[in-house]
Image (cartoon, rainbow, N blue to C red):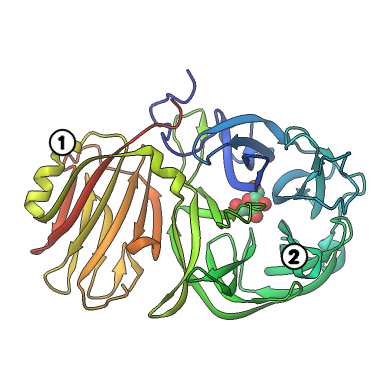
Amino acid sequence: ILYQEKNRPQFHFTTKRGWINDPNGLIFYEGEYHLFYQHNPYEREWENMSWGHAVSKDMIHWQELPTALSPDELGTMFSGSTVIDYQNTAGFNKGNTPAMVAAYTANAADKQTQCIAYSLDKGRTWTKYSGNPVIDSKAKWNSNDTRDPRIFWYKPGNHWVMVLNERDGHSIYNSKNLKEWTFESHTTGFWECPDLFELPVDCNKGKTKWVMYGASNTYMLGSFDGKKFVPESGKHYYVTGSIYAAQTFTNIPESDGRRIQLGWSRISHEGMPFNGMMLMPTELTLKTTKDGIRLFSEPVKETEQLFSSLNKWENLSAADANEKLKSYHDNDRLRIKTSIKLSHATSAGLSLNGQRLLDYDMNFNLVNGVFYSPQDMTSMEISADIYIDRTSIEVFIDGGAYSYSMERKTDPKNREGLHFWGTNIEVKGLEVYSVKSIWK
Ligand code: FRU
């Protein structure tokens, strides 16, 4: 039976077989979320890059569909994005059916070029544009690493925008028809898989900032006029760890208005018929903090259906909390929400069979080795929402101000289980949830 292997993640997307890396072409259309992804349908290793395809009604339960884009004479299918061409700017629409248009990179031995393809059946089958490639940066700039076109409609200017990784940064191109593109500007300091979008600050639609990031998720905030991104702050990080090449969904209805992100986790799955996985979908927001405006990331509300609260405690000593957690030692998946208060400026946290899920060093302001300074620097408190699957762990600190993901790598000989550590800490809150499988 499918999806039942020992090391198959139970609440994260994986393919039935083969390799996956970057999410591609994330889009919501006609009630379906589409997840395309870098895929080798034949082997567990990175090779034969194609666009795999899965659809979902809630971003949680996915149905894998046949491969969407396969290699051709221009190259293998590298990362990219999709849009719906409601105004038929490219002329691919048929009757009342607008085309879903994909922009992707064709990766050949001598160069990488940008191409487009369209689908009239909700992403199931695709026709590649006969005029491909639409951008050849090797010919124009002699740029070698030129890939991962991120396209979207820029309403105020009535034109398409492409953000493209080339010449060691992100270039902006404009187009009226998705076929002819003009270079507009360039921002250095990013690498691979660009994204660029506008977000309200503190939920105030009257005050917005544009966010630009690259594959490693470091970002800059700034302004954008359709042609040029002008950074005002950064680079900052909001998420670190195994995550790479995250992309946000396009075409989310305005009535919803969320900016939802999905990232690839660079975790290998030894001995499994598949390799690699997607992390949980998260909502990105901008909030004013003591350090300025910052990006926050939290699991989307759709994930809530997976969790049932098993137990809840308040104000425990570490020893008492560890005693309570004993009955959960053998769970293959779990969600734990906790907040701890330190007795003095030292280190404390929570581990699972020796692996540090939370390691807060209050003296140097480090969380699992990365600089993080809570809003209230003297409260001595930190909160963590921890999602444990069979092969991965995701942790959201202080309501998504900072998050990280890692491979679940517990020492099989260490039977310590879930264990709070630190001198005289107070476990102010502790909640344990069971997690449903998305495959049943
Ligand atoms: C990022 C990346 C992209 C490229 C793709 C190839 O992980 O290197 O830049 O398009 O993977 O699979």
Report crowding for label 2: few under 14, some 14 to 19, many 20 or more residues within 10 A (C-alpha): some
Kind of residue at badge 2: Tyr
Visible residue check, residue 72: yes
Kind of residue at badge 1: Ser
Residue 49: give x, y in percent of width and height. 68, 41
Instruction: Find residue 291 and report its image quarter.
Output: bottom left
Q: Nearer the viewer, residue 47 or 3?
A: 3
- Which of the two labelled residues, at mark 1 and mark 2, occupies the earlier sequence position? 2
Which of label 1 and label 2 is nearer to you? Answer: 2
Visible residue check, residue 167: no
Residue 425: give x, y in percent of width and height. 12, 63
State the SS at label 1: helix
Report crowding for label 1: few under 14, some 14 to 19, many 20 or more residues within 10 A (C-alpha): few
For image coordinates 58% across by 45% down, the residue present is: 21
- Answer with left or right where residue 185 lies relative to residue 310: right
The numbered disc on residue 154 is 2
State the SS at label 2: strand
Q: Nearer the viewer, residue 201 or 22?
A: 201
Residue designated by label 1: 327
Placement of the C terminus among the 4 image quadrants: top left
For image coordinates 40% across by 57% down, the residue present is: 404
- Answer with left or right where residue 37 lies relative to residue 366: right
